[in-house]
Amino acid sequence: MGKWTHSESIMVSRAPEDVYAMVADVTRMGEWSPVNTGGWWDSDERGVGAWFTGRNVNAEKTWETQSQVVADEPGREFAFVVGGNRTRWGYSFEPVGDETRLTESWEILPDGEKYFQERFGEDAEAEVQKRADAARTGIHDTITAIKKAAEAK
């Protein structure tokens, strides 16, 4: 199938630590994402290794995913993997003058490619392409909404 990845950046007129605090609060993601309607921490643990559940909705279905935090550096990076080790979502926060370059990234990992091959067989590439298309649109919409919310404060 090849490597499936996408990222997009936007400038936000807030400090990296402020934007990070918004994004790393997984209970708030439903405020910005066109698919995720919210999440909750699975325990009191936070930081790398912590698990959370997210609820997602699209025109076809509603589903929940379990994710584990794999990067948590306040003001620099927040990232998690979904479904064990199938997909990685990440956010980086880079200071640029008085602003922050917020970058959201998405990648199907090797375990994810294997999962799609096993589950969909010959249709695996088309199924991953659907998700890649949704990620491209979703990333743009999400970071645009985060920017709007961050700058409204």
Image (cartoon, rainbow, N blue to C red):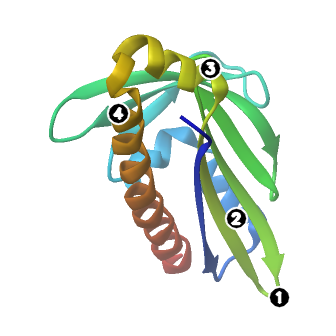
Q: CA distance from mark 2 to mark 1?
A: 15 Å
**Which of the 4 image quadrants contains residue 51?**
top right
> Image quarter for residue 47?
top right
Where is residue 115 drawn, in percent x and y? 50, 16
Question: In x, y percent, where is residue 152?
Answer: 48, 78
Circle 4 is placed at which residue position?
Answer: 127
The residue type indicated by label 3 comes to: Asp
Crowdedness near tag 3: few (<14), some (14–19) or many (≥20) residues, C-alpha within 10 Å: some
The Cα–Cα distance between marks 3 and 1, rounded to whole angstroms, is 39 Å
| Residue position for label 2 | 18
Which kind of residue does numbered mark 2 sit on? Asp
| Amino acid beneath label 4 | Glu
Estimate the spatial distance between the alpha carbons at disc 2 and disc 3, rounded to whole Å.
33 Å
Label 1 or label 4, whichever lies nearer to me, is 4
Q: Residues within 10 Å of mark 1 (few under 14, many from 20)?
A: few
Density class for disc 2 (Cα within 10 Å; few <14, some 14-19, many ≥20) is some
Task: Determine which of the numbered discs, if any, sits on residue 97 in the image.
Answer: 1
Q: Amino acid at mark 1?
A: Gly
Q: Nearer the viewer, residue 55 or 89?
A: 89
Q: Residue at x 34, y 37 (%)?
A: 126
- Is residue 32 toward the left or the right of residue 45 in the image? left
Q: Earlier in the sequence, mark 2 or mark 1?
A: 2
User: Distance between the Cα atoms at labels 1 and 4?
Assistant: 41 Å
Query: Which numbered disc, 2 or 4, marks the residue closer to the eye?
Result: 4
Q: Mark 2 or 3 closer to N-term?
A: 2
Q: Are marks 3 and 1 in contact (CB under 8 Å)?
A: no
Identify the residue shown where x is 49% and y is 28%.
Answer: 40
Out of 99 and 118, give the one closest to the viewer: 118
Above or below, 85 against 125 in this view is above
* Residue indicated by mark 3: 111
